[in-house]
Amino acid sequence: MQPRVTNPWVVCLSAASFFFFQFIQITMFNILKPELIIEFNADPAMLSFISALYFYGTVIFLIPAGIMLDNISTRTIIIAAMCLSLLGLFIFATATSIFSAGLGRFLVGISGGPFCFLSSMRLAARWFPEQRLAFVTGVIVAMAMFGGMVAQLPFSLLVAEVGWRTAMYVNLGLGVILLGLIYLYVYDYPPGKKHEYEQQMAYYRTAGFVHGLKVVIFKAQNWNCGLFASLLNLPILVFGALWGFMYVTQIFHLPRLQASTACAMLFFGMFLGGPIFGWISDRLLVRKAPMFAGLLLCFITIAILLLAPNLEFYTVATLMFLIGFGSSAQILAYPTVTDSNPPALAGSALGLTSTLIMAGGAVIQPAVGWLIEYQWDGLIEAGMPIFSYSNYNFAFWSMPLAILVATGLVLLIKETNCKSSA
């Protein structure tokens, strides 16, 4: 379809609204966890598994999604994925059993996770020059982090006011509105770029599917970038998406409003950090130095949070903000991958990178749930399990360890200096 829109920001931010919406779905379990435990009589480990079903669906379809985006209209894919995501959300909202809730969660993961970010990045690579790609990536991720913030305090207030099911219907209505926005403003290529677009889409037909996939899979740069981003993303998946709300209420004894605000600060840190790290990277024409800076900040602030169980609200909120800010350096993995692969294979390469990132969520969320319960004494109050400082720390020290491993991976990443090397 010939584009009727010429402003690249309108196109890419409209596509990123899907990412914004999906991040609400990823992180809402942080707030819904107490309600769902009581509603479905589920233990924390089971609920962690249900939450992780989103990531299982995402991981299964990420590489196929990347290949699809290299062969099929991005506009068509993102509209179809949004429709399937809304169907999965409806199933979850109307679930009467833990099984049907898990099915809905899985469908949302299949449809949203693989396509929301990859679609936005595929469009950004076509609509913007490569010298601005890190900043654009940061803005796209900032959109998602805004979704994470909406899923904390505002969503918490909505759930408290109308109940979790009605809140889910409001969530569903928001998705329908965003689907209309995507339909109106998302197009595959800028005006005058149709021939270049068609050449990219023909790559697999001329070079061969197996050849293209081998180029992506056997490039070590793609694996190093994906694993780096996956490990630096763990604080978001652990604190922001699932355990942060219970952790700050039970360990720091914060009331619901302050706890949800503290968790929202994690996403506010990423909201600001993504564009800032992207701008610095594009400005200095380097990718690796900002990666190291983000790792260092994230490591120090997580360690402080875990070592001090008697912090006040403002200190907890500040540390959460800094953890999110440091973690946002993960966004530099995406322009680095785009720099390092042929333009026609950008979707497939980003698909592999994103698979590794989401695989972290699929593995770490159930693992953290199991580790928290491992030394738990079984204490339950008003239907809610009560975990101790040592229960949480036994699991959460996995994050600083992951950051140390990520530091080693950055040493292996080849600096691109913001230029295509493919």
Image: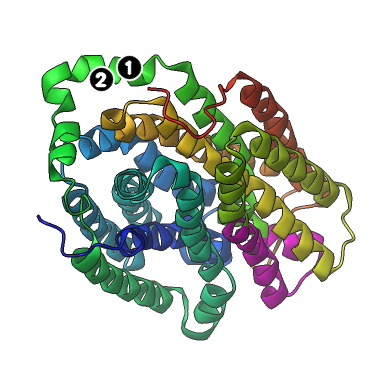
Magenta stretch?
Answer: 245-272
The image shows residue 412 at horizontal and vertical percentages of 61, 19
Between residues 243 and 314, which one lies in front from this camera angle?
A: 314
Q: What is the magenta segment's predominant secondary structure?
A: helix
Q: Is residue 212 left or right of residue 60?
A: left
Whether residue 357 is situated above or below residue 148 in the rendered picture: above
From the viewer's perspective, is 16 left or right of 320?
Answer: left
Kindly state the secondary structure of the residue where label 1 is placed.
Answer: helix
Tell me the CA gap for discs 1 and 2: 5 Å
Q: Which residue is mark 1?
A: 215
**Residue at (52%, 70%) from the top-left corner?**
150
**The disc label shown at residue 212, or none:** 2
Q: What's the residue at 49%, 33% (across, down)?
A: 336
Within 10 Å of disc 1 (Cα), the crowding (few <14, some 14-19, many 20+) is some
Vertical comparison of 198 with 142: above or below: above
Which of these two is toward me, 61 or 395?
61
From the top left corner, tell me how far across and down residue 163 is, in percent.
47, 79
The quadrant of the picture occupied by the C terminus is: top left
Mark drawn on residue 260:
none
